[in-house]
């Protein structure tokens, strides 16, 4: 199979290098200013394309790894987009974090164009993308998933079929609400501890030995204790976007959003102050007393 990828960012770059180096597939990618440097994947044989339509014209499988629903919709339906150029039987695998209702619409457009659609968001970090050990939550038809498992296997450790189309993105938003919510709460607590002069290592050890032990603590601890933000290279603006997607999904289904509203407000303040491209661990600093947010 010839693979296409649109979105060679922090996550997409790791996916691309493993599709090439581990999977041995031919790869075409959308040449875009938002990409990470592409020297490595070009050196492995990847071919740049000027438009999404050019990617679609050569690919049996097209992986989307972009910011959210507006970007996915533009790629699928926009001028020189995927829908007008898909090869018969091509499969679009949307690894972005997107709104389920939008995913269902994009899936229908792709089906009308003669292709198939899977939502397959990721639940790990850029480090895992680089290592080829991502986990995917896949919504869509099981038979379609089976066709692309060889490609997905090149950059994943685990691929779970979680239900029909849209359920991958629904579960990703549920997952990110819990994950980002935990980290936002923890960052606020760590900021208060720092303001009070609590030893950061003692703070981490107390939480780790009790009810605060969690993946959130594991990811923020390097920053709390040593100022190392790179354990989680995830922008605060993207975290806020994911929480607001969760709120939109919840509101559409009539679910309560009281806690999610608070998390969104906490993240909105540093974003409004110009810190949207800070990494999530840096919330520990941004939430400190006297910091302008």
Image: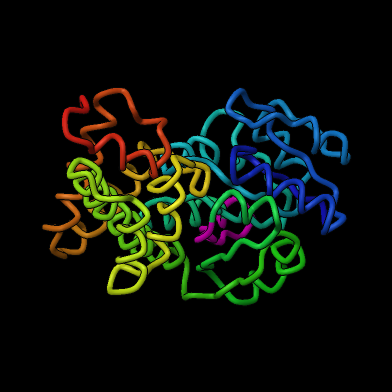
Specify whether residue 123 is painted magenta.
yes
Q: Residue 123: where, in percent of width, then height? A: 50, 61
Tell me how many marks there are: 0
Q: In this view, does 23 lie above or below 279?
A: below
Q: In this view, does 277 lie above or below 183?
A: above
Taking depth in this image into account, of 100 and 7 the one nearest to the observer is 7
Magenta-colored span: 111-124
Q: Residue 136: where, in percent of width, then height? A: 56, 65
Residue 72 shows up from this direction: no
Taking depth in this image into account, of 72 and 152 the one nearest to the observer is 152
Taking depth in this image into account, of 65 and 105 the one nearest to the observer is 65
Taking depth in this image into account, of 89 and 203 the one nearest to the observer is 203
Q: Is residue 144 above or below residue 269?
A: below
Q: Which residue is drawn at 68% across and 40% down?
A: 85
Q: Which residue is drawn at 68% across and 50% down?
A: 130
Q: Residue 255: where, in percent of width, then height? A: 16, 65
Q: Residue at x 66, y 69 (%)?
A: 157
Left or right side of 65 for 46: right
């Amino acid at each position: 199979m010839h693979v296409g990828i649109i979105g060679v960012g922090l996550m997409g770059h790791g996916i691309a290098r493993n599709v090439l180096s581990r999977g041995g597939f031919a790869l075409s990618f959308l040449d875009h200013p938002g990409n990470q440097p592409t020297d490595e994947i070009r050196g492995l044989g990847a071919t740049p394309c000027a438009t999404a339509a050019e990617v679609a014209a050569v690919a049996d499988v097209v992986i989307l790894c972009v910011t959210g629903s507006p970007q996915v919709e533009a790629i699928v339906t926009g001028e020189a987009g995927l829908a007008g150029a898909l090869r018969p039987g091509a499969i679009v695998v949307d690894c972005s974090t997107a709104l389920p209702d939008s995913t269902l619409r994009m899936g229908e457009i792709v089906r009308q164009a003669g292709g198939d659609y899977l939502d397959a968001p990721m639940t790990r970090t850029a480090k895992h993308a680089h290592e080829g050990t991502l986990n995917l939550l896949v919504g869509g038809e099981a038979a379609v998933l089976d066709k692309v498992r060889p490609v997905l296997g090149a950059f994943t450790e685990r691929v779970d079929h979680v239900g029909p189309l849209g359920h991958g993105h629904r579960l990703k938003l549920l997952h990110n609400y819990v994950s980002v919510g935990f980290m936002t709460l923890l960052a606020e607590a760590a900021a208060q501890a720092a303001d009070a002069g609590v030893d950061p290592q003692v703070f981490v050890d107390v939480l780790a030995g009790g009810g605060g032990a969690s993946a959130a603590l594991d990811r923020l601890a390097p920053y709390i204790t040593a100022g190392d933000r790179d354990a989680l290279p995830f922008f605060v603006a993207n975290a806020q976007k994911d929480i607001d997607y969760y709120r939109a999904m919840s509101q559409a289904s009539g679910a309560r959003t009281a806690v999610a509203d608070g998390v969104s407000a906490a993240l909105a303040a540093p974003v409004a102050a110009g810190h949207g491209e800070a990494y999530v661990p840096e919330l520990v600093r941004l939430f400190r007393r006297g910091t302008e947010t």
